[in-house]
Amino acid sequence: MAAAILDKVNFSIDQPFGIKLDDFFSQGYQLVTGKSIDSFRFTEGVTPLSTNKEVLMWTLTYFVVIFGGRQIMKTQDAFKLKHAFILHNFLLTIASGTLLLLFIENLVPILTRHGLFYAICNAGAWTQRLELLYYLNYLVKYWELADTVFLVLKKKNLEFLHYFHHSMTMILCYVQLGGYTSVSWVPITLNLTVHVLMYYYYMRSAAGVRIWWKQYLTTMQIIQFVLDLGFIYFCSYTYFAFTYFPLAPNAGKCAGTEGAALFGCGLLSSYLLLFINFYRLTYNAKAKAAKERHATSKTVKGAIKSKHI
């Protein structure tokens, strides 16, 4: 089998990794669903989790479970769940990495042949295969809600940033699927990149390994949102300028619904502000506390030295 795969290795625009990952993806999809991968379409009311009612139900269930669970856990001992947590994060690392590679394989030909503006604004950049990847990424957001369940069962702090980000990102993915925003791949691929590192960190940390670059995860998330907003603000601006203010400078029409564009701009802007605030409160406070401890230590040592003299 390995020899057969090596025989197919051929680096090209359509095979940036040397082999066609889509071939394996197609076989896996056929095996799991019993359908051809080319048959998938995100259809409201037909595709699972494709209606407002379903999304609202899952969102409400999420909040009932985590806040109800937190109340119940007040009288219970915290669960360890070490091995389950390691497995959970390992699988999410693999899932995020696999989706990222599939996105790259599909995006390289589009970017190479048509350019960046086409890839983020043209309706032709919303391909059937990318739509399937967007949908699978959306499903993973439901899986990621289990992150919060682990926090509740382990009696860890439940920060607003955490449950707001988890629940609203799930809704964001749903809105963008229905809005056919061609720029969706930008925030999704950046998010997957961060998640590969983040879930790897959680997996290793749960196994007792001290990871020195923990602080940089939040920095990466902030950079991710800055890049996200740069792209979606541009796409939204050129759409609204072209549509309503044609005399204003613009790059032309951009694919996607107005509602999806405005929702994405608003939500990702709130994420950026929340993560900056989290970084400021968490790491700046730690740095200040360390500085104060150092100053106190020097004062105590100085007092002891003076006493001995």
Image (tube, rainbow, N blue to C red):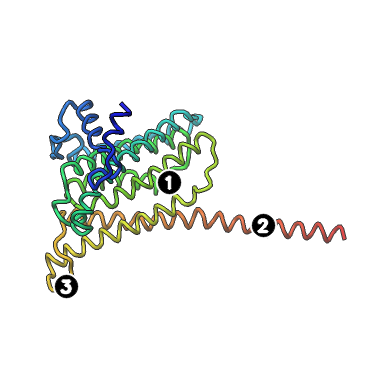
Q: Position of residue 246 (x, y in %)?
A: 12, 70
Rounded to the nearest whole Å, what is the CA distance between mark 2 and mark 1?
29 Å
Quarter-wise, where is residue 227 in the image? bottom left
Question: Which residue occupies 41% across, 53% down?
Answer: 220
Mark linked to residue 159 = 1
Residue 241, x across and y down, in percent:
16, 67
Residue 250: give its label: none
State yes or no: discs 2 and 3 in contact (Cβ < 8 Å): no
Quadrant location of the C terminus? bottom right
* Horizontal side, residue 83 vs residue 66: left or right: right
Of the numbered discs 3 and 1, the one sitting upstream in the chain is: 1
In the image, residue 29 lies at what x, y percent? 22, 31
Whichever of labels 2 and 3 marks the residue nearer the N terminus, that label is 3
Query: Residue sitting at 26 percent across and 37 percent down?
Result: 21
Marks 3 and 1, how far apart at CA = 42 Å
Three-letter residue code for mark 2: His
The secondary element bearing badge 1 is classed as loop
- Residue beneath disc 2: 294
Q: Nearer the viewer, residue 229 or 93?
A: 93
Q: How far apart are the alpha carbons under marks 2 and 3?
A: 56 Å
Occupied quadrant, residue 25? top left
Q: Please, what secondary structure does the residue beneath circle 3 have?
A: loop
Decide which of tag 2 and tag 1 comes sooner along the chain. Answer: 1
Q: Nearer the viewer, residue 73 or 170?
A: 170
Q: Which residue is mark 3?
A: 248
For the residue pair 213 and 140, the one nearer the viewer reads as 213
SS at circle 2: helix
- The percent coordinates of residue 249 (x first, y second) are 18, 72
Q: Amino acid at mark 3?
A: Ala
Residue 157 vs residue 93: left or right? Answer: right
- Left or right of 237? Residue 168 is right
- Three-letter amino acid code at the position of disc 1: Glu
